[in-house]
Image (spheres, rainbow, N blue to C red):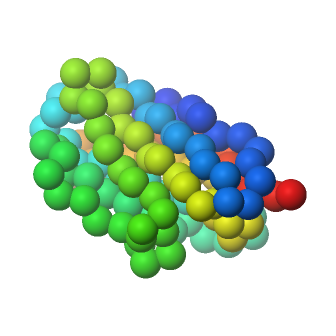
Amino acid sequence: VQLVESGGGLVQPGGSLRLSCAASGFTFSTAGMSWYRQPPGKGREWVALISSAGNFLHYADSVNGRFTISRDNAKNTVYLQMNSLKPEDTAVYYCTVRVRSNDYWGQGTQVTVSS
């Protein structure tokens, strides 16, 4: 299983970014996917999840209404569209999947929200 995140960077408050996570090594279309983040000096926190078919979405309260998770099963990719970014969204963002009772994580992508 391999997960590769991309799309992070430096953005001003109020700006937007779209993160991508390219997956391989498992049957992507049958797996729910999640995004987590780890702010500097803090623990990892869950951000959003999407079901295998993309018809069930759930968000942490801190990002609900600003972030949108989606997936393209033809491209084996999950996305996180982040709008109205705040400085407190600064973190390393990870995608994750559970395959046969094992949790797999990508290497993460840094998102910094600062003026």
Q: Residue at x 57, y 32 (%)?
A: 6
Q: Residue at x 67, y 52 (%)?
A: 15
Comparing 2 with 74, the one in front is: 74
Q: Is residue 94 above or below residue 87?
A: above
Residue occupying the far bottom of the picture: 61
Q: Is residue 81 above or below residue 91?
A: above
Q: Quadrant of the N terminus?
A: top left
Q: Quadrant of the C terminus?
A: bottom right
Residue 20 at what x, y percent from top left? 47, 35
Q: Is residue 15 above or below residue 9?
A: below
Residue 76 at what x, y percent from top left? 29, 26
Q: Is residue 91 left or right of residue 30?
A: right
Which of the 4 image quarters holds residue 57?
A: bottom left
Which of the 4 image quarters holds residue 68?
A: bottom left
Residue 111 at what x, y percent from top left? 68, 49
Residue occupying the far right of the picture: 115
Q: Residue at x 29, y 65 (%)?
A: 58
Q: Is residue 13 above or below residue 103?
A: below
Q: How many marks?
A: 0
Q: Is residue 1 visible?
A: no
Q: Is residue 37 left or right of residue 39?
A: left
Residue 17 at what x, y percent from top left? 59, 44
Q: Is residue 62 left or right of residue 57?
A: right
Q: Is residue 31 visible?
A: yes
